[in-house]
Amino acid sequence: MKEESPTYTISAMPEEERPRERLVEFGAERLSPAELLAILLRTGIRGKNAVQLGHDLLDRFGGLHGIHQASFTEVCDQKGVGLAKAAQIKAAIELGRRLSVEDPDVRKAINSPSDAAEIVKYEMSALEQEELRVLLLNTRNQVIRKTMVYRGSVNSSQARVAEVFKDAIRNNAKAIIVVHNHPSGDPTPSPDDIAITRAFVQAGELLDIQVLDHLIIGRGRYESLKERGLGFG
């Protein structure tokens, strides 16, 4: 009979190196991404424990962002992962995404571009195609609603400018923040981004709805056109 290949479990590791024990003692924030993945994976493969397998996943996909962006099948097909472990990893990522966008009972006022970026960057940085979304704000600069306006390249089409303000008018919003992503990961504004921003600002002045900013989300960073003085002024 063929000898079964042993797996390497977390319990086989020295106690001071076990991710679960380290989490209990020091808190989740002290663990590395590979250790957090190891808790989800639970077991490794022949010659590699769960932490080493976590490192392999991070290397294969280029970090946590890459795992977030990868399809379920791509994660599932990695050696030592399989259906159940891939499901656990994707479920954990989805919980993190929902937590990042969950509306608190008391809405936080948007006082800076970073405040607005925090609401959308986790989800939008992983999108494979360009999307334009709008944050609708009340008189206290609190987000009352988030809307997805369209998918596709941003340009200065006047019909699309009208779409940006449609839900703002319906919801009696006093201001908006426009957000779109660059799937390339580079949030540098293009000439079309600047042109459409200028059109948004001009339309907002006519409708008495202030455009507070236009954010571009990239991989792990963002750009504020308002801060850079592009399309505003």
Image (cartoon, grey):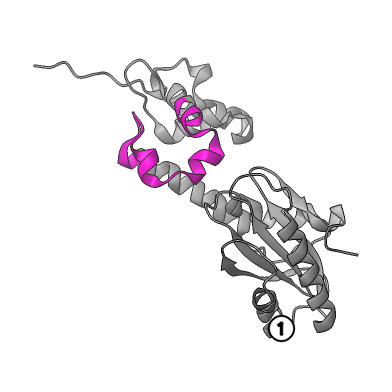
In the rendered view of the protein, which quadrant contains the N terminus?
top left
In the picture as drawn, the residue positioned furthest to the right comes out as: 233
Q: Is residue 153 left or right of residue 51?
A: right
In the rendered view of the protein, which quadrant contains the C terminus?
bottom right
The residue tagged 1 is 169
Query: In the depicted view, which residue is nearer to us: 99 or 64?
Result: 64
Magenta span main SS: helix
Using the rendered view, name the quadrant where residue 29 is placed. top right
Q: Position of residue 227 (x, y in %)?
A: 85, 54
Q: Is residue 144 above or below residue 19?
A: below
| Number of numbered labels in the structure image | 1
Query: In the depicted view, which residue is nearer to us: 205 or 31?
Result: 205
Q: Residue at x 31, y 21 (%)?
A: 7
Q: Is residue 215 visible?
A: yes
Q: Which residues are magenta?
A: 56-84
Q: Position of residue 189 (x, y in %)?
A: 74, 52
Using the rendered view, name the quadrant where residue 185 is placed. top right
The reply to whether the magenta stretch includes residue 19 is no
Q: Position of residue 19 (x, y in %)?
A: 51, 27
Q: Position of residue 122 (x, y in %)?
A: 61, 50
The reply to whether the magenta stretch includes residue 80 is yes
Q: Is residue 126 left or right of residue 197?
A: left
Dot 1 alpha-carbon crowd within 10 angstroms: few under 14, some 14 to 19, many 20 or more: some
Q: Residue at x 31, y 41 (%)?
A: 83
The residue under label 1 is which amino acid type? Ile
Using the rendered view, name the quadrant where residue 196 is placed. bottom right
Q: Is residue 174 left or right of residue 18?
A: right
Q: Callout 1: helix, strand or loop?
A: helix
